[in-house]
Image: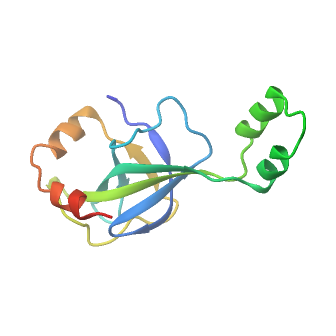
Amino acid sequence: MSEEIEVGRVLRANTQGFTVGCLKLGLDAPVFGALVKAPIRGDGGIYGLVYDVTIQDDPFVRQLLAAPNLSDETILDQRQRRQAPYEISILVVGHLMGNEVRRFLPPQPPETLNRVYTCSQDEVRRFHQRFDHFRTILQAR
C-alpha cells in the first residue's frame, strides 16, 4: 500500500500492544504482519504489526443463527449494520520520536479513540532498515 489508509480507532492499549476497532473490514484492510502506526502525545507515533483479527458476535447474530430460513439479504444487512466492531490486535515494535525511529517499546501507549493508519511504503522501508524489532517479535506470546 503506498497511501496511508485509516484502519480504525484504538479500543484499548498498553505499551506492548493495542487493539483497534472498526465497523467493517474493507479490501484495503491491513493483513497479518502489516505495519501500522498510531499517534502518541507529543511529537511521535507508535509502530506495530497486525497479528490477529477478531470478529465478535453480537446478540442479534446469535438470534439469526437460530433462524430456520436465513436469507442472503438478511446476512448482508447484518454485516453492514454490525453492532460489535471487528478487533485488530497490534504488537508494538517501535516508535517515532521526532524524526528518529526507535525499535523498542514506547514510553506510553496510544490513547483510546486515536486513529490508526497503515504505513506508507516509504515508512515500511525506513522502519525495516534495521531489524532490532525482531527481538520484540520473538519474545511476544
**Would residue 38 be found to the left or right of residue 112 on screen?**
left
Q: Position of residue 90 (x, y in %)?
A: 39, 55
Answer with the quarter of the image where residue 2 lies: top left
Q: Residue at x 33, y 67 (%)?
A: 16
Relative to 49, is 113 on the left or the right? right
Is residue 31 placed above or below 116 in the rendered structure? above
Is residue 102 visible in this depiction of the protein?
Answer: no
- Residue 6 lies, in percent from the top left, at 46, 41
Q: Quadrant of the C terminus?
A: bottom left
Rendered-image quadrant of the N terminus: top left
Against 10, residue 49 (above or below) is above
Q: Is residue 7 left or right of residue 125?
A: right
Q: Residue furthest right?
A: 68
Could you tell me which residue is drawn at 17 percent across and 37 percent down? 125
Residue depicted at 73% across the width and 54% down the height = 58
Query: Where residue 67 sits: x, y (%)?
Result: 88, 42
Number of disc labels: 0
Question: Vertical placement of 124 versus 51: above or below?
Answer: above
Whether residue 24 sits left or right of residue 127 in the image: it is right
The residue under the point 71% across, 38% down is 79
Could you say where residue 33 lies in the image, as x and y percent from the top left? 33, 43
